[in-house]
């Protein structure tokens, strides 16, 4: 017989994951080096001998620009907290054929979460993988969520686990990540996820 707390716990965990799915994954922002081209530094002529300059259009006249200043984003005062504190890496394997799904790495912001809390998931796969979902099961009930594809071989999920009842806390649930290729073949990895 299944313990009622475990049954309800699995249901609440599945519901929490579904609620967390409502928050879309953030789009990657361009790096500062890709954001805008930088101007070449201005040079000045020596002050001892004036150099005649050819006539120029108003757009060719150099203007004085202020020296660049550092922003707080460029000089963090404290090191950032790692986004993914729990990392699962598959043991190295030979390079698979192009149509074989492989889960190479699964990153979570933690494998012991204390709701209410954010939930960040990153799954690195072979490029053959077209979809990834996570599921948790308990006897007759299975709940799953789709992990959105950010680019070939990269699946990201950012959401929020709401507060849960106290009888659901302090239980560990098996969460299975399933990667599917276009030809229907799958690869899966099961990891423990604890709600404190």
Image (spheres, rainbow, N blue to C red):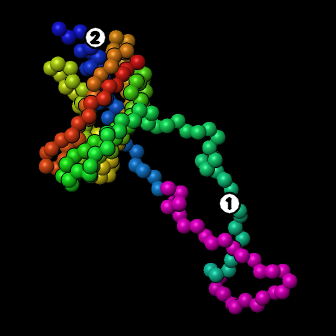
**Residue 44, position in %: x, y?**
75, 77
Q: Pointer 2: residues within 10 angstroms few (<14), some, or many (20+)?
A: some
Q: Which residue is mark 2?
A: 5
N-terminal of the pair, mark 1 or mark 2, is 2
Screen quadrant of the C terminus: top left
Tell me which residue sits at (43%, 36%) in the image.
84
Tell me which residue sits at (28%, 28%) in the image.
175
Tell me which residue sits at (26%, 34%) in the image.
189
- CB atoms of marks 1 and 2 within 8 Å: no
For this rendering, which residue is in front, 141 or 126? 126
Choose top left, top right, bottom left or bottom right for residue 92.
top left
SS category of the residue bearing label 2: helix
Q: Which segment did they paint magenta? A: 31-58
Q: Classify residue 115 as left or right of residue 32.
A: left
**Residue 2, position in %: x, y?**
20, 11
Q: Is residue 23 visible?
A: no
Vertical order, 136 against 150 (above or below)? above
Q: Which mark is residue 68?
A: 1
Vertical order, 110 against 44 (above or below)? above
How far apart marks 1 and 2 lie (CA) works out to 60 Å
Asked whether residue 79 is drawn in magenta, I would say no
SS category of the residue bearing label 1: loop
């Amino acid at each position: 017989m299944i313990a009622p707390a475990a049954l309800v716990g699995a249901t609440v965990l599945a519901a929490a994951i579904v609620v967390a799915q409502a928050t879309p994954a953030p789009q990657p922002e361009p790096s500062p080096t890709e954001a805008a081209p930088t101007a070449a530094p201005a040079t000045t002529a020596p002050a001892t001998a004036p150099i005649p300059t050819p006539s120029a259009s108003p757009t060719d006249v150099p203007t004085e620009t202020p020296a660049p200043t550092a922003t707080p984003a460029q000089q963090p005062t404290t090191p950032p907290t790692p986004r993914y504190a729990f990392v699962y890496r598959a043991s190295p394997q030979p390079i698979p054929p192009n149509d074989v799904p492989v889960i190479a790495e699964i990153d979570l912001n933690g494998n012991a979460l204390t709701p209410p809390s954010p939930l960040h998931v990153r799954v690195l796969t072979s490029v053959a993988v077209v979809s990834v979902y996570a599921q948790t099961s308990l006897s007759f009930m299975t709940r799953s969520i789709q992990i959105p594809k950010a680019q070939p071989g990269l699946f990201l999920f950012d959401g929020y686990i709401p507060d849960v009842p106290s009888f659901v806390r302090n239980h560990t649930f098996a969460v299975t990540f399933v990667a599917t290729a276009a030809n229907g073949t799958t690869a899966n990895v099961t990891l423990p996820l604890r709600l404190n």
